[in-house]
Image (cartoon, helix red, strand yellow):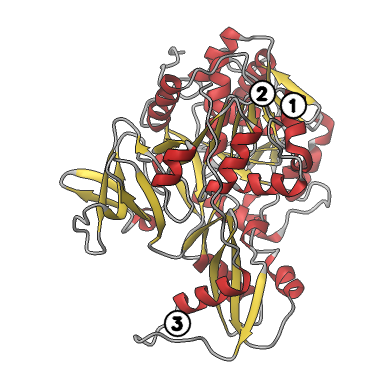
Amino acid sequence: MEPIAPTALHARFLRGLERSPHQVAVRVGKETVDYTTAHRQALAWAGALLCAPGGPPKAVGIVAGRSLTSYVAILASLYAGLPAVPLLADFPAGKIASMLAAAEVSALIVDEEGAALLGADRGALPAELSALAGLPVLAPHMAAEETGTLAALGLVPVRTGPASALPAPRSAAPEDVAYVLFTSGSTGRPKGVRLTHGNMAHYFALMDSWYDFTAADVFSQAANLNWDSAVSDLWCAWAVGAPLVSVSPHAYRDLPGFVAEHGITVWFSAPSVISLSRRTGRLVPGSMPSLRWTYFGGEALQFQDTDAWQRAAPNSAVINVYGPTEMTITTHRHRWSPEESTRLGVNGVVPLGLLHDGHAELLLDEHGEDAGDEGELWLAGPQLSAGYLDPEDGRGKYLERDGVRWYRTGDRVRRLAGGELVYLGRTDSQVQVQGYRVELAEVEHALRDASPVTGAVVVGVPVANSTELVTFYLGEQRSPQEFHRDLAGVLPAQLIPRHYHRLDEFPLNTNKKTDRLALTARATALHGKPAQVPAPVPVPVP
């Protein structure tokens, strides 16, 4: 078997294994797995997948909750030389089915939550997942005598054993796909982004050069594994042989207490975590002294929240990061400085920062012409993904210009004198809700399809540090509870609006189109809560 190329993403785990063979690799609640055990399990699972009926899979779907299985499954997929497709077991079954089909997943790894989604506890495969019949499924939590439950569903149980285990991980070329991560689609269906080993290699080479991570660090893992920031957490920790601690929902009741309990030194999450922690009354000055590095991304980072976090973590640098999934995790970074950041920021939002080395950016107007220092951001470079699973989704997004392949972000930005960018807003209807990218068209599609409305417009309203979805609809009066019941089967919880207002008709603009700006202004007046700008505080250098 050929040696592992240093640019293969899983070569980072092998580095950590060599440095810390007996160190905890992942902690989920009270359960842990060390580097050596995770390595052996991944080799066994990878070999079993490659020997599964039907031949080697094209891609491995990981349908799971927060469990040790989900982490080892990602490693096993890469050890087998296959793309990992992490999906949340609490997604609606229909959405899971469409994602698996789009990614051409031909084998699954599931934990208890994933097995329950498949119907293992009910004895019947859900109708929405009927296309999975005959698919090989590895369920490590099941004993050999229990896997008959999967067979009864029409699935093919995959069993592990010494005979099928790989002797060593397979390598991967830079152009090979490492991950498929899904973003919301404007047509109401998810768009799968193909991230290659080469994309990852460039991103993590920069991370290695910028930050002094060691095996003595303890990394948080706040995002779910289907989000790109979780990719960053995982492979930064594993490359240095450090432990990764999964952050459970109840941890936010006392986040500083959780950080102290586990000695967390590196934190990465959406900014919404800050206001959540502030509301508990626990985020007080000096309450998180162990933190050395903090990263926030996925939505606008407000001055007030950044100041509160910095006071609570006086020994940490606080970094605002920016980048669409299509450009592999992040492309810009800005380190918080009370004086400088507040001087440069716009609308109380911390700047996006400077572009990553080796990349290029353009600011263009709606006609694709140079817009000077303010326009829509286009990006190019080695972190540009291989594109969407469906090339049709890339029309108007991945574009050739002067012989260079670019990604059109849809974000409006301003370039400052020093080259840093500040965020001005979206050029389309996409918004960020608790770190999740939400296409408003997808939510409107679900409302029209799943509830008895005759028309629906969804807008995003800034609420302190995040965004809330507000629905205006035509038809009979309905309660929020009724809407929630309708939407829970077709949308993840993060995409379900919080507020609903019935109208007799939608306002129209001069072009006789629905006036979304007017509806957004109305929703903001009803539900918006602008952020406050804090007094500056000194920032220590870690």
**Which sits in the foreground, 378 or 490?**
378
Q: In the rendering, at what x and y percent does residue 307 appear?
A: 57, 41
Q: In the rendered view, does 450 fall on the left or right side of 513? A: right
Horizontally, residue 4 falls left or right of residue 222, namely: left
Marks 2 and 3 sit apart, C-alpha to C-alpha, by 51 Å
> Whole-percent x and y of residue 253?
78, 43
Mark earlier in primary sequence (2, 1): 1
Q: Is residue 38 above or below residue 486?
A: above
Q: Amino acid at mark 3?
A: Thr
Element assignment for label 3: loop
Q: Which mark is residue 514?
A: 3
In the image: residue 46, left or right of residue 258: left
Among the two numbered marks 3 and 1 on one chain, the one whose residue lies closer to the N terminus: 1
| Nearer the observer, 220 or 108 | 220
**Foreground label between 3 and 1:** 1
Q: Are marks 2 and 1 in contact (CB under 8 Å)?
A: yes
Residue 62 screen position, x and y as percent: 62, 39
Assess disc 3: are there few (<14), some (14-19) or many (≥20) residues with their C-alpha within 10 Å of its C-alpha.
some
For badge 2, the amino acid type reads Ser
Kind of residue at disc 1: Ala
Give the labeled residue for mark 1.
Answer: 260
